[in-house]
Each structure stands twice: as structure tokens, then as C-alpha cells.
Image (cartoon, rainbow, N blue to C red):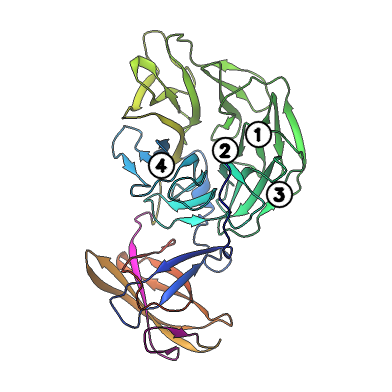
Amino acid sequence: MPLRRPRTHRPHEVVLFVSALSQRALLLTAVLFAALLSPLVPDAQASTYPGANGAIAFIQSGDIYTVQPDGTELTNLTNGYQADADHVSISPDGRYIAFSSSGYGDLDDAGIYVMNMAGEGLSDLTSYDDDLIAVGHPTWSPDGSRLAFEAYNWDFKNEMYVVDVNGGNLERITNCNCVQFSSLEWSPVEDKIAFQNYEVVWTIDPDTGATQKIMDDFYDSSSGIHWSPDGTRFVYDDLLDIWTINADGTNAQQLTHDRAAYYADPAWSPDGTEIVIESNWGGADQGLFAINATTGVQEGGSGIREVYDGLGAQSDPDWGPACEGACDFVNLTLIVKKQKAKIKAGGSVVPAAGGQKVKVELFKLSGDKLKKVGKKTATLKPDSSYAATFDRPKGKACAVRATYNGDAKNAPATTFVVLKC
């Protein structure tokens, strides 16, 4: 993983610009506090596995794409900027995607990023920590509230870290001075993380740091191990074939045997019936295929089907569950109008003191027109921030939080993406 370019900014912030259509529009800084709004935390019920199959995320030429299991609805989530992504991971509720970036594309820093499955609401969770010089392998906790990942520090030691989905509580949970983790993945049903270090597979409790060795002399998998959706088995690649094995290291089963093709980067489907892989099966350059998770690929080609084979190589697939509930992400423009907050000439803002009130209006951006969705009077917090919940079309509530932050006279017209509705 390449070293990142250092930069300094305050943690847990994503700077957003509101529409300049009003002279009284304000520049806002969205502060993502899960305890207040839980903007990225999925409902516990939505995290239940197994689940219905949803989109498959993968990397192609450094960008992140999604595609449906039947090969339709191909979408470039990072279209318009170069993500330089290394690994992708879909949240347990199918609404968000985490990825690691080496920071040499259009993103400023190497780090762990999260966005919704529409490619919106990008949040940088880790690059404010200058001790982390390279990161990789983000993986979600079963309830979707935290992410684990591995990173190198300035001593060039590889360690494991955990961070909340709002970027808070970043902490190291290993002290092994490991040379390299081949992979790590949070169990979908338990609060433990499996990881591979050379030919040994371990689990670690992310809260206590207690480790347990579960397999010695493990195969040297190029992509590491990946849990089954019920947490009882792993899938991995070894010498260009796909294998599954019980989580205690017993009952290994080889699923591919064709010496004319290679098979790599496996990930289980949420319903447990198939495994998505990267392969050149059938003459593909390097595409995505799904194989039967029980019987594997049979002689004659049964048990395997093509998902997507496009231009360039597709790699590091992750298969997410079907999103249920409020999954229709809406772009919204947030405009704050004058009430007791003082507005100077030129549009700069003197934040009102805590306890005062501001009038907040929520607009839906449709083309170049704004449609008012709702309005609220919100009480300012002591830090001059406010929180409000709005009803939008279809009767679903959208939670937002923002803080005043200076001059917005020349702010470009853009959209504020509400992360929870």
C-alpha cells in the first residue's frame, strides 16, 4: 500500500456547501455524531444474516462499481473522481459501502471512506490520524456501527484498528508488530474478527483484544479468508482455486478444479447459496462470476455463471444484502434563514449563542429548481450547532445536524446529502 500525503484537518468533519441561490445561505460543516443522529448506523434487525441478495460491489481501474447479481444495473459510484480504491465492504443492511484508498487519486488522503450505495455522502473516517500511513481491508461490525481495518504506522508495523462509522473512537486493538495481515473480516454473527497472518488464522475480540488461534499451517491464500453468512465456514482461494472450510479448521472442500482457469477473491452471497469470485473462466479477461457454494463448479461448466465481464479487470468483489426500508437516497439542499443568528453584509455569519433559535428550511433539489420539503425552528446547542428532523415526501423523516462555519457568499450551488431518512 502506498504512503499517503500528510495533511491536517479537524477530525470527524465533512465540509459541505449549501446553495448560493439565497444571499442568506450559510456554509455548513456536517458533524456526524452517531450518538445524536446515528446517520450511518443501520438498524439491528437489518443486520440479520442470512439475507436476500443485493448488489455486488467491486473495483475496476481504481473506481468502485456496483452491479446486480444478474449482471444488470452496472453503476460507477465514483464516477467523476478517481477513488484509487483498494478494498470494498458493504454494510450489513446493504445501504453503505466502506472502502480504503491509497490517496493518490482525487481523494486527498489515504484512509477509510464510507458512502451510501448511490455513491453519495462521502465521509473520511481516518486520515486525520497522521500516525497511519497506509490502510486497507475495512470490514463492518455485525450491527454496522463500527469498522475494523489494518494499517501501517511510521514504524512500518502492521496493526489492526477499530473506528466508529462517524470517525470517532479510533483505536488500535493489536500490538503484535505484525509484518502484514493478509486479510481481516468481522464475523457476521459474533463480535469477533478473523484475520490471517502468514499461515496462521486467528480471531480477536475487538473490545478486549483477546486473541485465539483457530488454524495452524493454513493455506497461503492470496485474498485471505471470508466468513459465510451464518458464521460457520470460511471461503478462501489457494493456488488459484476456491475452497471452503469450517470455522474450526475442519472439513475443507475444494470448489474449483479447472486448470485452464484461475479463481480468486471469493465472497459469499448473503443467502449463502453462491460465492462471487474473480476469474478468467470461459475465456474472460478477468471478470466476475458466481459459483455454487455447496457443489462448486462441475465438469461441463454447471455450477458457475458469469455476472459481469467488462473492459478492464474486476477485482475485490463484496456481495451485499438487499436494502430494505428507506433505501431511496435523496439529494437535498439545506438553507438556513435569518432569525436570531446575526447575518453580516456579504453573507458571513456570527453564530448565535447556545439556547437561541434558528429557522431551518429543507429543500429538495430537482434539476435547477428547489422544492420546499419542510421547515423547523431548531434550538442551538452550546457549540452553536443544531439538530432537526424533517419529514420529506413519502412521509419518511430525515435527520440532519450542522454547525455554522463562516462565509457562504460565494459558496457553489450543490446538494446536502441526508444520510439517514
Nearest to viewer (mark 2 / mark 4): 2
- Residue on which disc 3 sits: 172
Kind of residue indicated by mark 1: Phe
Q: Secondary structure at mark 2?
A: loop
> Crowding near pointer 1: few (<14 within 10 Å), some, many (20+)?
some
Considering the image in quadrants, where does the N terminus appear? top right
Q: Pinpoint residue 318: horizontal percent, then vertical percent.
A: 47, 36
Q: Which mark is residue 181?
A: 1
> Crowding near pointer 2: few (<14 within 10 Å), some, many (20+)?
some
Kind of residue indicated by mark 2: Met
Q: Mark 3 or mark 4: which comes first in sequence?
A: 4
Q: CA distance from mark 2 to mark 3?
A: 19 Å
Q: Is residue 420 magenta?
A: no
> Crowding near pointer 3: few (<14 within 10 Å), some, many (20+)?
some
Q: Quadrant of residue 215?
A: top right
Q: CA distance from mark 2 to mark 4?
A: 18 Å
Nearest to viewer (mark 2 / mark 1): 2
- Residue on which disc 4 sits: 64
Q: Which mark is residue 1?
A: 2
Q: CA distance from mark 3 to mark 1?
A: 14 Å
Q: Mark 2 or mark 4: which comes first in sequence?
A: 2
Q: CA distance from mark 2 to mark 1?
A: 12 Å
Q: CA distance from mark 3 to mark 4?
A: 27 Å
Q: Mark 2 or mark 1: which comes first in sequence?
A: 2
Nearest to viewer (mark 2 / mark 3): 2
Q: Pinpoint residue 15: horizontal percent, then vertical percent.
A: 46, 66
State which region is magenta: 327-351
